[in-house]
Each structure stands twice: as C-alpha cells, then as structure tokens.
Amino acid sequence: MKVFASFLAPHIQDFIKYRQASDHWNESSYEKNLKLFDQHCYESYPYAQELTQEMSDGWCQQREHEENNSCRARIYVVVSFIRFLRNRGLTEIHDPVLPRIEKGVYIPHSFTQEELTSFFQECDTVPLLSTRRDAQMRKLTIPVYFRLLYSSGIRTLEARLLRKADVDLKQGILDIRYSKGRNQHYIALHDSMLGVMRDYDSAISKFSPDRTYFFSNGNGSHYSSQWVVENFRNLWYKANTARATAYELRHNYAVVNINRWIDTGFDFNDKLLYLSKSMGHSTLESTKYYYSIVPSLSQILMDKTAKGLDWIIPEVADYEEIY
C-alpha cells in the first residue's frame, strides 16, 4: 500500500480499511486517485490541519479537455472519502460537483467464431518464459481466466478478485461478492467450464496450496487490471487484426444468449430476468443495452412485446460502467 503524506493520511488509511472490510475497494483505480488527491493537499496546503472546500474543489474541478465520464471516474473515490469523513463528524464540507454522465457511443467488437478459436489457441500455447514459479502459474492461469470470461459473462474485475473460498467446485457455483456497486450475485458454471476450473485448481494448488484468490499470482495476491489488458492484447493480436478488449467477452456472452431467443417462443420476462441476474445487473435497464448491438433481435422483441416493451424496460439512461 502506498504511503500518504498529507495531514489526511490517518483518515485515508481508515477509509481504505473500511472499504476493504466491506469488499468495495478497487486498488488499481481508487488508491491511485486517493494518492493524487493526498499529494495535492500535501503540496498545495503543507500546513493545513483540516480539509476545506477549497482543497476539495481545487482537485475535483473538471479540467480543460477532460471528458465528463473521465472526470467522474477520477474524483469518485474522493467524493466517497468526503462522505466517509462527513458521516463521522470529521468534516463539514460539501461533496464536489460531479459532472453529468455522458451517454456513450461505444460499440463493442462482434467476435467471429474464427477469431475466438484462434485467440484461445494462442492462450493454450502461451510459451513458458522461464522456469520461475510465477511464470509457470501465468501459463496455467491465462487459458482458464479468459475462458471463464467468455463462458460466464463475468466482469474482468470479478474474475480477478474471485476468492478460492467463493468457488464451489462441487456444485459449479461462483459467489460474486466483489462486483459493480453492492450487487452480490451467483453464477452457475457450464459443465465444461466446471471441468476446466477443477483441473486448474488441482494444478495451481501445487504452486499455491493456501492461496486466497482463485487466480493467484506468484506473490499470493490477485492479478492486476494491467495484467489482463496486456495479456489479452498480446495474445489477441498474434492471431487477429480487429480491435477487441477482454471486457468485450462479457458483451459477447450477452449477445450470444440473446440470439438464442430468436424464434424459440421464449417467455420474454423470464429469460430477460435470468440473463440480468446472471450478469449481475442491478436493473433490467442495463440488460436492455445489449439489444442495440443485436440488430436482428431488436425488431423481433418489438413485435413480440409491442407497447409493453417500453413499460417493462424503461429507456436506458446510461451504459454499463466498466471497472
């Protein structure tokens, strides 16, 4: 954990412990921005003894050329920290102003079967870079981690922070405790994926028998978001040219499932709810987003549900946020 230098250091440490205890701490982004805020207070207000509105607003103010969503992502943890202090009577300042959410125009990559086949072939043939323990663990982990994303629709963060204790390898159930917001949920593994997970657990346990995280690195911690980005990118572009990200395997999971509903006489409400819960969406609105990337389904859903569609699923205000 990084060392904080300003007068806020003890409070920041308490805040981090509080968030960690409730399983709502994202080290890769939260700690970085808290560190930058702490540095701002230390350098600009070296003799300060209490937090002021000027300190908060000075760092949280939207910067020139900074997009609304980027600003929100940067200052969100500081807003949460200020609320933490205020709820404990440690400050009376107001929350910084959050810019309005901008509706995204992002369209995820539509995977072809050939692309996926070639990608997983690269995963299965990852070279062993050395005989070191961490290199051998990486070779075992890569094909299983990315197959879990593909087969379950789990978020990349959820997979990285998945604890061994929350993986039921007998029943094939994942208990997703650390998710977007506070939405704990369960995922049932496909039988084929369950077999892969069992084999992986047996193999990786020889290197780390008492590991905390299911996908544990050589240091006994979870893999970082950068680890996911770099490994996916390197393996993907060895066999494919189209731009794609690891998170888009989650989108692919939703689209493939939705496409299976076409011409099957499905019960719309049931299948929509099952998909929404499986993906950890807090509302059906988030699930509705995927209809926009399945053109052939959009009209079919409209025909089957008529005016009831807009009543069942209100207009989406925002796309699902990626962590």
Image (cartoon, helix red, strand yellow):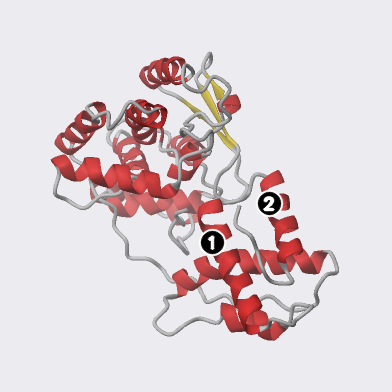
What residue lies at 29% left-to-right and 57% top-to-bottom?
107
Mark 2: secondary structure: helix
Residue 42 x %, y %: 65, 76
Q: Which residue is mark 2?
A: 19
Q: Relative to 224, is 15 on the left or the right?
A: right
Count residues near mark 1 (Cα–Cα under 10 Å), then give few for <14, some for 14-19, many for 20+.
some
The one nearer the camera, 8 or 120, is 8
Q: Which one is in front, 39 or 270?
A: 39
Name the residue at 33% across, 41% down. 249
**Earlier along the polypeptide chain: callout 1 or callout 2?**
2
Residue displayed at 33% across by 25% down: 131
Does the rendering let one see residue 247?
A: no
Residue 294 in the image: x percent, y percent? 27, 48
Residue 69 visible somewhere in the drawing: yes
The residue tagged with tag 1: helix, strand or loop? helix
Whether tag 1 and tag 2 are in contact, CB under 8 A, the answer is: no
Which of the two residues, 82 or 183, is positioned nearer the viewer here?
82
Q: Amino acid at mark 2?
A: Arg
Find residue 286 and report its horizontal and vertical position in percent: 46, 52
Q: Residue type at mark 1? A: Lys
Say which of marks 1 and 2 sits in front. Answer: 1
Residue indicated by mark 1: 32
Residue 266 percent across, percent down from the top left = 38, 33
User: In the image, 302: left or right of 171?
Assistant: left
